[in-house]
Image (spheres, rainbow, N blue to C red):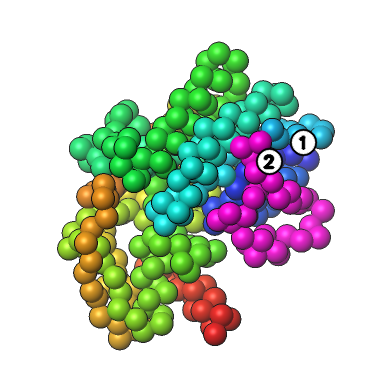
């Protein structure tokens, strides 16, 4: 039974990854300080002999007894609301946290995967974005705390790979959605879902013409698992290239929820990307991966989760 560590394992993506690894026969050690993660996301794993939870801040030295085969470094605030609320913590987990996780991988001779992001491309001047694109990032803007933390994390990961010979992987995650997203997450789909289900106005920033490419969570986890088990060490985009405007996304969610909500427009946040779409040729060629869950089906599954969650909170 291989042992895998998932930092940020109580988060949206981390908890789904824990489920997948256990299903693949791994013993999973989930590490999370619960700043933005939730023990509700892993409550169903309580008592599972293949799972262990450690509440801990990975910006400190990480000690784990026994052998470790794989480390998935997912610890980080990931939504604009979170990294604007926790700017220093975001920078620290991207720098110090990545350094500590890489140090553990080196000590255990474990394979390491960094959860990076499409935000390393910033507000892109190239569309769609291939891995060869270096990005258009404002390092001193409000989003810079997340963008630059992840860019630094990629550089640190490659330094450990080249200097120490560490076996590393880097996944650049594009917009992902699904069950276990927080209601107050702040990103488009949970915001639109919760507003529509409550019958509130649905808030679209700017004129809604900016685009996003949204990937259902099970597809993303499949791509990440395949990357970790591959032999490829350079960054790989994982996301769904099915591009949609934010306004169209809001309209689809209002229709799926059967809501009477109106759409209202507010000022576009600083440095908000105008376009976002992954070039996934590498993932297709190297991993044999492509997304399989269409946007309509994924949104219906997500709507059912949010409806249950909101009913529970009443």
Q: What SS does tag 1 mark? A: loop
Which residue is rendered at x = 59% and y = 16% of the image? 165
Magenta-span inclusion, residue 111: no
Location of residue 114 in the rendering, given as x and y in whole percent from the top left corner: 53, 35
Looking at the picture, does residue 193 appear above or below residue 241? below
Q: Quadrant of the N terminus?
A: top right
**In terms of depth relative to the viewer, which is nearer, 201 or 164?**
201
Q: Mark 2 touching mark 1, by CB under 8 A?
A: yes
Lateral position of residue 98 relative to residue 86, left or right:
right
Q: Which disc, if any, is residue 216? A: none
Residue 186 picture quarter? bottom left
Magenta segment boundaries in residue numbering: 31-60
Which residue is rendered at x = 56% and y = 20% of the image? 160
**In terms of depth relative to the viewer, which is nearer, 55 or 74?**
55
Q: Which of pointers 2 and 1 lies earlier in the amino acid sequence?
A: 2
Residue situated furthest top in the rendering: 163
Q: Which disc, if any, is residue 5? A: 2
Q: Nearer the viewer, mark 2 or mark 1?
A: 1
Looking at the picture, does residue 168 appear above or below residue 119? above
Q: Can residue 78 be seen?
A: no
Q: Can residue 263 be seen?
A: yes
Q: Which disc, if any, is residue 64? A: 1
Marks 2/1: CA–CA distance: 9 Å
Which residue is rendered at x = 39% and y = 60% of the image? 187
Location of residue 24 in the rendering, given as x and y in whole percent from the top left corner: 68, 47
Which residue is rendered at x = 52% and y = 73% of the image? 305
């Amino acid at each position: 039974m291989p042992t895998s560590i998932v930092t940020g394992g109580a988060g949206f993506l981390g908890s789904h990854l824990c489920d997948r690894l256990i299903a693949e026969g791994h013993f999973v050690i989930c590490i999370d300080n619960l700043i933005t993660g939730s023990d509700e996301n892993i409550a169903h794993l309580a008592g599972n002999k293949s799972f262990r939870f450690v509440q801990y801040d990975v910006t400190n030295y990480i000690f784990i007894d026994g052998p470790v085969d794989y480390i998935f470094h997912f610890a980080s605030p990931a939504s604009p609301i979170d990294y604007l609320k926790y700017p220093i913590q975001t920078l620290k987990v991207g720098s110090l946290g990545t350094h500590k996780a890489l140090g553990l991988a080196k000590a255990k001779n474990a394979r390491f995967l960094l959860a990076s992001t499409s935000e390393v491309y910033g507000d892109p001047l190239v569309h769609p974005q291939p891995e060869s694109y270096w990005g258009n990032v404002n390092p001193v803007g409000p989003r810079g705390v997340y963008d630059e933390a992840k860019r630094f994390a990629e550089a640190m990961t490659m330094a450990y790979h080249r200097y120490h010979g560490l076996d590393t992987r880097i996944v650049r995650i594009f917009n992902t959605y699904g069950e276990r997203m927080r209601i107050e997450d702040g990103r488009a789909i949970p915001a639109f879902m919760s507003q529509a289900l409550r019958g509130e106005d649905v808030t679209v920033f700017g004129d809604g013409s900016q685009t996003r490419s949204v990937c259902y969570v099970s597809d993303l986890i499949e791509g990440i698992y395949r990357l970790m088990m591959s032999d490829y060490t350079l960054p790989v985009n994982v996301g769904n290239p099915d591009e949609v405007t934010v306004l169209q996304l809001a309209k689809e969610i209002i229709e799926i929820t059967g809501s009477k909500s109106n759409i209202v427009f507010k000022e576009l946040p600083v440095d908000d990307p105008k376009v976002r779409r992954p070039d996934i040729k590498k993932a297709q060629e190297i991993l044999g991966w492509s997304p399989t869950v269409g946007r309509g089906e994924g949104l219906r599954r997500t709507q059912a989760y949010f409806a249950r969650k909101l009913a529970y909170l009443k």
